Image (cartoon, helix red, strand yellow):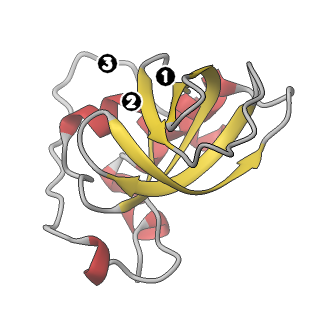
């Protein structure tokens, strides 16, 4: 990943467009969860899929709405059970069903620890995972 990030250019040439297949959660391959950030969530092509998002917990209403700040700085709401164990500032990877452009239904999450570098993770998504050059490495077979 480091070499791939180092070799990306910042030229002003137009970025290639990527065509995303129309997929629903029921047709999604087992274990294939697109890694997304706030910007990708807002684009809308992953709505209806199980996704993986990394973020820092910001707020919990004590009922069902957990707010996280994604690796790219945008915020989304994670719908959780009322028994959810909220830890302020915790960095998590959350896998769940992307309901709309702002809401993910929580399925499972894991603590990534305080040492997680959100900036590097965000760059990995924006410069590697969404780059057509590397699509064959990250798309479900």
Task: Identify the disc placed on residue 30.
Answer: none
Task: Identify the disc placed on residue 72.
Answer: 1
Give the CA distance from mark 3 to mark 2. 24 Å
Mark in the foreground, 3 or 1: 1
Q: Vertically, is 20 above or below 72?
A: below
User: Sequence order check: which comes first, mark 3 or mark 2?
Assistant: 3
Can the viewer see residue 7? no
Query: Badge 1: few (under 14), some or many (20 or more) residues near its Cα, within 10 Å?
Result: many
In the rendered image, residue 137, in percent from the top left (x then y), is placed at: 48, 67
Looking at the image, do the residues carrying marks 2 and 1 touch, with CB atoms under 8 Å apart? yes
Residue found 64% across the figure and 25% down from its top: 57
User: Sequence order check: which comes first, mark 3 or mark 1?
Assistant: 3
Residue picked out by circle 3: 11
In the rendered image, residue 79, in percent from the top left (x then y), is placed at: 46, 43
Q: Vertically, is 25 above or below 84?
A: below
**97 or 53, nearer to the observer:** 97
Q: Quadrant of the C terminus?
A: bottom left
Residue found 39% across the figure and 58% down from its top: 97
Mark in the foreground, 3 or 2: 2
In the rendered image, residue 42, in percent from the top left (x then y), is placed at: 25, 32
Residue picked out by circle 2: 38
Residue found 79% across the figure and 41% down from its top: 112
As helix, strand or loop, the secondary structure at mark 2 comes to helix
In the rendered image, residue 85, in percent from the top left (x then y), is placed at: 75, 39
């Amino acid at each position: 990943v480091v070499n791939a990030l180092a070799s990306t250019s910042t030229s002003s040439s137009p970025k290639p467009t990527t065509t995303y297949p129309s997929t629903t959660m029921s047709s999604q391959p087992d274990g294939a969860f697109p890694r997304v950030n706030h910007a990708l969530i807002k684009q809308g092509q992953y709505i209806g899929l199980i996704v993986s998002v990394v973020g820092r917990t910001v707020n919990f209403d004590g009922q069902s709405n957990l707010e996280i700040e994604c690796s790219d700085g945008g915020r989304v709401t994670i719908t959780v059970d009322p028994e959810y164990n909220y830890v302020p500032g915790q960095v998590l990877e959350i896998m769940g069903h992307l309901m709309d452009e702002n809401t993910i239904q929580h399925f499972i999450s894991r603590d990534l620890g305080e040492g997680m570098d959100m900036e590097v993770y965000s760059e990995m998504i924006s410069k590697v995972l969404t780059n057509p050059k590397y699509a064959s490495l990250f798309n479900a077979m």
